[in-house]
Image (cartoon, helix red, strand yellow):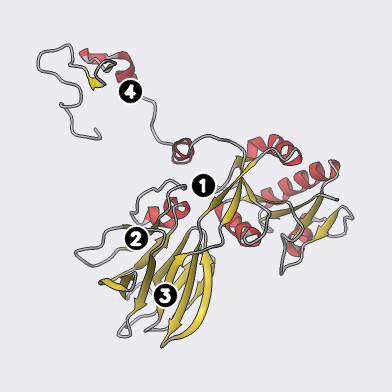
Amino acid sequence: MTRRILLVAHPRRTEALHVARDVVARLVAEGIQVALMPEEAEAVGLRTDSSVIEADPDAPARGCELVCVLGGDGTILRGAEMSRGTDAPLLGVNLGHVGFLAEAERKDLRATVERIVSRDYTVEERMTLDVRVARDGEVVARSWALNEVSVEKASRERMLELALEIDGRPLSTFGGDGIVMATPTGSTAYAFSAGGPVVWPDVEAMLMVPISAHALFARPLVIGPGSRMAVEILPENEGSGVMWCDGDRMVEPPPGARIDVWRSQMPVRLARLTTSPFTDRLVAKFDLPVEGWRGAARRNGAAGWDTGVAPEHGMGRIGRGPHRVQGTSHPAGA
């Protein structure tokens, strides 16, 4: 049976198209059939190439063993929409900036193709969210999200008045710029920018993060995976709201609309090339300072400090100087 891979690239990014041609050539040379969306096949200049087939826009990942995405997180999210609900996992090669969803970088392209050819990867599942928009009991829209569902004000000059609900119980009402309801995967995306916590992707939870709320209680919330979140756009709003799913699929809910969000039974499957923990990804993507003068001071015991741990008790040792105990001279996080 012929192997087939769906290749997804940004059709208007020169670098992505150049990389796509290279990947197609490498895969075809290994006897693997490559599927491209019609617009991308045209942009890459391979629409008439017999080694490339055009994917069905209604089911692009059908018959594919893998969806390989070349681009940033936005393009990877588009690939997730194509792969969700199929057996084909998603593998992203980062051509953007942060690329939290990507599994490989541009410089690792040759090795990545080799791993694809040899099927040398593991697969993990990521939680997604289902969302329903209704007004007066009538459903007006349905969608889903891998990262987040955001309900935001449509115009800069007007606050959006929202009522929040968890598990059918009222929680709070406030005016502000909106709210983000996110998965652990999305905790490093919009929810992070709005002040939410970073949640490890294997944690079973959902997030609710207000955006610039004009309220005394507007803290980010971590909610159990079996709970149901709801946001009502209050009818007395002077402005209007807009709902985004992963910053791509947009709905304009009318005043008085209710948005219900809950954990979906259909995850997104991601292909993993490494077994390194999420901590390493977090440090690399955010360029966190794990080395430097603080680390050197701890390693070298600088300025008279002893940073060892007493193995027999598991307690911090007392410093060499009088009345100096490790960890008591500076506030936490210093």
Tell me the element at label 2.
Answer: strand
Separation of residues labelled 3 and 2 (CA atoms): 15 Å
Task: Quickly name the residue at label 4.
Answer: 293
Residue lying furthest right in this view? 50
Upstream in sequence: badge 4 or badge 2: 2
- Residue 196 placement: quadrant: bottom left
On screen, residue 321 versus residue 29, left or right, reads left
The picture places residue 2, in percent across and down from the top left corner, at 85, 50
The picture places residue 136, in percent across and down from the top left corner, at 41, 88
Separation of residues labelled 4 and 2 (CA atoms): 35 Å
The answer to whether residue 159 is visible is no
Report crowding for label 1: few under 14, some 14 to 19, many 20 or more residues within 10 A (C-alpha): many
Question: Identity of the amino acid at label 3?
Answer: Ile
Upstream in sequence: badge 3 or badge 2: 2
Tell me the element at label 1.
Answer: loop
Q: Give the numbered dot on residue 209.
A: 2
Relative depth, front residue between 82 and 109: 82
Question: Identity of the amino acid at label 2?
Answer: Val
